[in-house]
Amino acid sequence: MEYIIRGQNIQVTDAMRDFVEKKLNRLEKYFEESITSDINVTMSVTKGRHAVEVAIQLPNVMLRAEEKSEDMYASVDLVVDKLERQIRKNKTKLNRKFRQNSGIRTLFQDEGAPVKVLEEEDELELVRTKRFQLKPMDVEEAILQMNMVGHSFFMFANAATKEVNVVYKRSDGKYGLIEQD
């Protein structure tokens, strides 16, 4: 695994880098083959809160987790635990998807003991569908509309690009924009 570790408002020391690499190496046991893509780790400090974000790009799947705490090392532990839970929870579904779509035998390896999966967890239940007209607007207007309806995201037709975009409110209170390729 190749690590890209960067800091925002913090200097990443060799001790921190070694700790992150050691903890993330625990994830290797879940994969059939070693991860060939880069693992992006962003460490930041905002208002005394230490945040760690990890993004692992796998074939057709992105694993991502973010955790914040009062201590950077605790945040690293929490984010690795969160990634392990994501892998264990979705391992069966993702392996099935990979066998069907890409011919890859499996993405995640089976652990020795059988995993008991409840049927309710395996099914994703759609409980509501909404339909609406996409009004052409600029990004600022879309953010205002999102705030007026009290949602954390808002889909709209971008007047400048004529594409469907999504604006969303980030955990840091700022806004993000999702555009299609």
Image (tube, grey):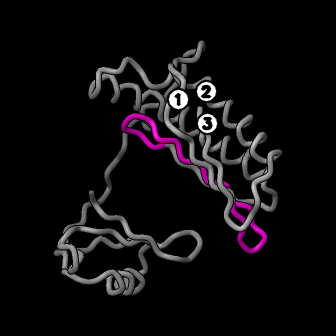
Q: Which residue is mark 1?
A: 35
The mark that comes first in sequence, 2 or 1, is 2
The mark that comes first in sequence, 1 or 3, is 1
Query: Label 2 neighbourhood size at 10 Å, few (<14), some (14-19), many (20+)?
Result: some
Query: Contact (CB < 8 A) between labels 1 and 3?
Result: no
Query: Contact (CB < 8 A) between labels 2 and 3?
Result: no
Q: Which residue is mark 2?
A: 28
Which residue type does callout 1 highlight?
A: Ile
Label 1, label 3: how far apart the Cα atoms are = 15 Å
Residue 67 visible within the image: no
Q: Which residue is mark 3?
A: 84
Instruction: Report the predominant secondary structure element of the magenta stretch.
Output: strand
* 155 part of magenta stretch: no
Residue 159 drawn at (x, y percent): 21, 80
Residues shaded magenta: 44-62
Q: Is residue 121 left or right of residue 45?
A: left
In this rendering, the count of numbered labels is 3
Query: Contact (CB < 8 A) between labels 2 and 1?
Result: yes
Which residue type does callout 2 highlight?
A: Glu
Give the label, 2 or 3, closer to the camera: 2
Q: Which residue lies at the image location 36% right of the left edge and 38% below the top edge?
A: 60
Residue 37 visible within the image: yes
Which residue type does callout 3 highlight?
A: Glu
Residue 17 drawn at (x, y percent): 75, 45
Compare residues 80 and 147 and report the one nearer the observer. 80
Compare residues 134 and 38 and report the one nearer the observer. 38
Give the label, 2 or 1, closer to the camera: 1
Q: Is residue 76 above or below residue 104?
A: below
* 53 part of magenta stretch: yes
Query: Label 1 neighbourhood size at 10 Å, few (<14), some (14-19), many (20+)?
Result: some
Asked which secondary structure carries label 2, the reply is helix
